[in-house]
Image (tube, rainbow, N blue to C red):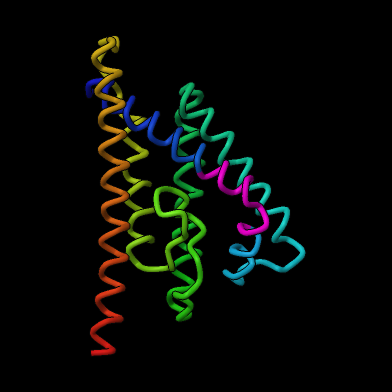
Amino acid sequence: MIDPLLPGIVAVGFGLLWLFASMHKLGEHGIFEATLADYQLLPTSLVRPVARLLAYTEGCLAIAWIVRAQPVYVVGISTALLSLYALAMGINIVRGRTGISCGCSFAATGEDARLSWWLVLRNLGLVAVAFIALVPTTGRHLGAADYMVIVAALLACALLQVAIGQLRKNRVAMMRGSRHG
């Protein structure tokens, strides 16, 4: 058994992750459809309906994580979707198609990252983290201080994500610079 604070952080974190992902896909549906088409994994006739389905599924997952409805199903669907995204990225990386957008970097930078094994590993790491929500917890109830810890932990995770994104950009810029020098 673990303290309920950790699954609380995971639940709110995944709720926000799926919420922002869904809003991004719905708000910029044309761009997301083009990105999905760039993966070249679906027939053209399925790109638009699959793009909509993914956006609405992510929105439903956001709500389900936040209200903690049916954790086994929510974790199962979340991990299946993250694994599917990782597989799609991996297929395109193996094909040598790393110049296409991942369709997943909606925060902070305002631009999507290009496909890389780092993004595949990030998704698989998120799969592992999601399972924390299924670990039995002690009977302790969360108090006001716990909710402040949840907010602080999520802010720290967001800052870490931004920092990693910037490090990846710096690495790419340095590699380009060393080729020209």
Describe residue 92's horizontal placement relative to residue 7 as left or right.
Answer: right
Q: Quadrant of residue 55?
A: top right
Describe residue 26's horizontal placement relative to residue 76 as left or right.
Answer: right
Describe residue 48's horizontal placement relative to residue 143 as left or right.
Answer: right
Q: Residue at x 61, y 72 (%)?
A: 40
Count of numbered circles on the image: 0
Q: Quadrant of residue 86?
A: bottom left
Q: Residue at x 31, y 73 (%)?
A: 172
Q: Residue at x 73, y 68 (%)?
A: 44
The percent coordinates of residue 150 (x first, y second) are 29, 25
The percent coordinates of residue 167 (x first, y second) are 25, 61
* Quarter in which the C terminus is drawn: bottom left
Q: Measured along the vertical axis of the image, is residue 61 above or below residue 149?
A: below
Q: Residue at x 26, y 82 (%)?
A: 177
Q: Main secondary structure of the magenta part?
A: helix
The residue stretch that appears in magenta: 21-32
The percent coordinates of residue 71 (x first, y second) are 45, 28
Q: Measured along the vertical axis of the image, is residue 6 above or below residue 117?
A: above
In the image, 49 versus 74, the foreground residue is 49
The percent coordinates of residue 38 (x first, y second) are 60, 70
Is 155 included in the stretch rendered in magenta?
Answer: no
Q: Measured along the vertical axis of the image, is residue 148 above or below residue 82?
A: above
Is 22 included in the stretch rendered in magenta?
Answer: yes
